Image (tube, rainbow, N blue to C red):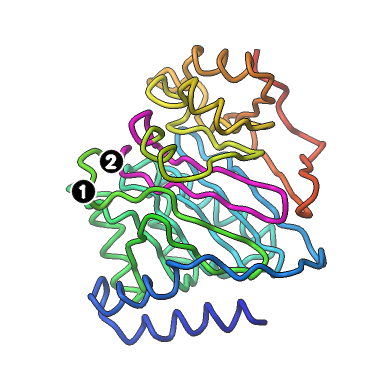
Amino acid sequence: MRSMRIILLLVSVLLCFSLNSASAKRYMMSIHTTSPLHMHRQHLSKMKVSFLKVGQGDATLIIMPNGQTMLIDGGPYEAGEVIIQKLIEKGINHLDVIVSTHPDMDHIGGLIPIVEQMPVSLILDSGKTYSSLTYHTYRNNIKKRGIPFVSVKEGQYIPLDPHVSIQVLNNGKSKDENNESSIVLKVRYGKADFLLMGDADVRTEHEILKQFDVHADVLKVGHHGSYTSTSETFIKKVEPQFAILSYGSNNPYGHPHQSVVKRLKRHGIMVYRTNKRTVEMETDGEHIMLESSGLMPLLK
């Protein structure tokens, strides 16, 4: 109930401001620049993380232990309807937060139909603008729906559940390249850590390593497993048990690059992929469980 009051208060205040107003930005800063209170957790529920099958793109759904929902990216445009159907199957008819990591079409395209068809309380953005038709359509739809739209700051926390820490490790307002501007999130529930890299490249990895603890049990590999991401140094610091590669079969970009796959496997990391089906995980804060049916085996 506490987390519900927090998010309702956040939304109600932001609705009073114009989109991207200075007041809205100051309010977000005041809410999110301090760490959540440390609380004794009672494992009444699990956190569920779905790395969605969206073709050549990226989309991750997190259902907090208290039921709050966060969708991180929406894949390409055609994936939007697929994601909506997936949400309906999970009994979700409203999204508390959407995070658009950066303005590439394979990350925000699917958010266009989602924003059109599903109630959304808040959209968090990297702050990186773009001149593409996809980006302008996305922003215009948000304005038409009157959804609060706020740029995140490095180091801030997103308060969706008092037992879950969601910290922003990178944003994009001062970055030139879209991929370099990707929002990077570290999500922690109890002892379980998820590091979600968006399309961050090795330069962003280097900057993050200088500022934050990146150790995580699950790594959503940056930039679909491109050779421009997931350096040897970064893997050694993260030390993940699981790595998730989000990409479409027979894509023209060569994702994932075999050098990255081999690097992950050399470290004994279990690698799963979304090109065939959604990868479902859940955690009680002590253990991480994989959905047993339908998971793809380790990449060869």
Q: Which residue is drawn at 61% across and 29% down?
A: 273
Q: Is residue 194 magenta?
A: yes
User: SS of the residue at dot 2?
Assistant: loop
Q: In the visual, does 52 lie left or right of 241? A: left
Could you tell me how far apart the alpha carbons at marks 2 and 1 are, in whole angstroms?
8 Å
Q: Residue at x 76, y 53 (%)?
A: 285
The label shown at residue 178 is 2
Whether residue 100 appears in this view of the structure is yes
Amino acid at dot 1: Tyr
Residue 65, placed above or below residue 300:
below
Kindly give the residue lying farthest to the left in the view shown.
Answer: 131
Q: In the visual, does 276 lie left or right of 186? A: right
Quadrant position of the C terminus in the picture: top right
Q: Residue at x 63, y 65 (%)?
A: 92
Q: Residue 226 or 109: which is nearer the viewer? A: 226
Q: Does the magenta stretch include residue 201?
A: yes
Q: Name the residue under label 1.
A: 130
Report the number of numbered marks: 2
- Badge 2: residue crowd in 10 Å (few <14, some 14–19, many ≥20): some
**Magenta stretch in the rendered image:** 178-204
Residue 231, placed above or below residue 189:
above
The earlier-in-sequence mark between 2 and 1 is 1
Q: Position of residue 68 (x, y in %)?
A: 62, 68
* Foreground: disc 2 or disc 1: 2
